[in-house]
Amino acid sequence: NGNSTPEVAVLMVLPSGQGLVKIKDGETGTWIGQIRFFGSEWQAKAIASQDLDLDGVSEIAVLAVRKDGTRSAIQIKYSMSGEPLNWVELPDQRQRRVFHSPRQR
């Protein structure tokens, strides 16, 4: 929020599975915002915060798994506005392949 004190971001998982990140001012302890992540077909699992686009302000990333277990994804949003920055979908976990280096044969 610009006061030079880091904020605290907390991931709450709503009964629907949707992620809700609540942001608390690190200096005053006041809740200053909240950002929703994913829809009800997803189950939010983890949160991370880092300045990913090097603009001097941390973004928030949330990892979630589809409730049917077919996919995982990371949704990244700007912490100040909640606007989407990126969406990264991870491979289907049911189709894992094991790769071996030529030396292991």
Image (cartoon, rainbow, N blue to C red):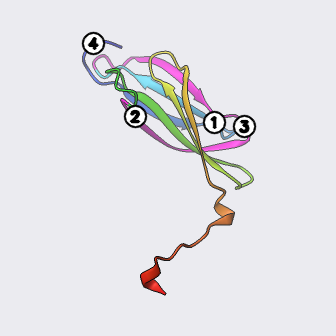
Q: Main secondary structure of the magenta part?
A: strand
Crowd class of label 3 (few under 14; some 14 to 19; many from 20; radius 10 Å): some
Mark 3 touches mark 4? (CB < 8 Å): no
Q: Is residue 15 left or right of residue 49?
A: right
User: What residue is shown with label 3?
Assistant: 40
For marks 1 and 2, give the CA distance.
20 Å
In front of the other: 8 or 79 = 79
Q: Quadrant of residue 38?
A: top right
- Nearest to N terminus: mark 2 or mark 4: 4
User: What residue is shown with label 1?
Assistant: 14
Mark 2 touches mark 4? (CB < 8 Å): no
* Badge nearest the viewer, 2 or 4: 2
Q: Which residues are magenta?
A: 27-51
Give the residue type at disc 1: Leu
Q: Quadrant of residue 54?
A: top left
Q: Quadrant of residue 1?
A: top left
Q: Which mark is residue 30?
A: none
Is 14 situated above or below 83? below
Q: Which mark is residue 49?
A: 2
For marks 3 and 4, give the CA distance.
34 Å
Identify which residue is drawn at 54% across, 36% down: 12
User: What residue is shown with label 4?
Assistant: 3
Crowd class of label 1 (few under 14; some 14 to 19; many from 20; radius 10 Å): few
For marks 2 and 4, give the CA distance.
18 Å
Crowd class of label 2 (few under 14; some 14 to 19; many from 20; radius 10 Å): some
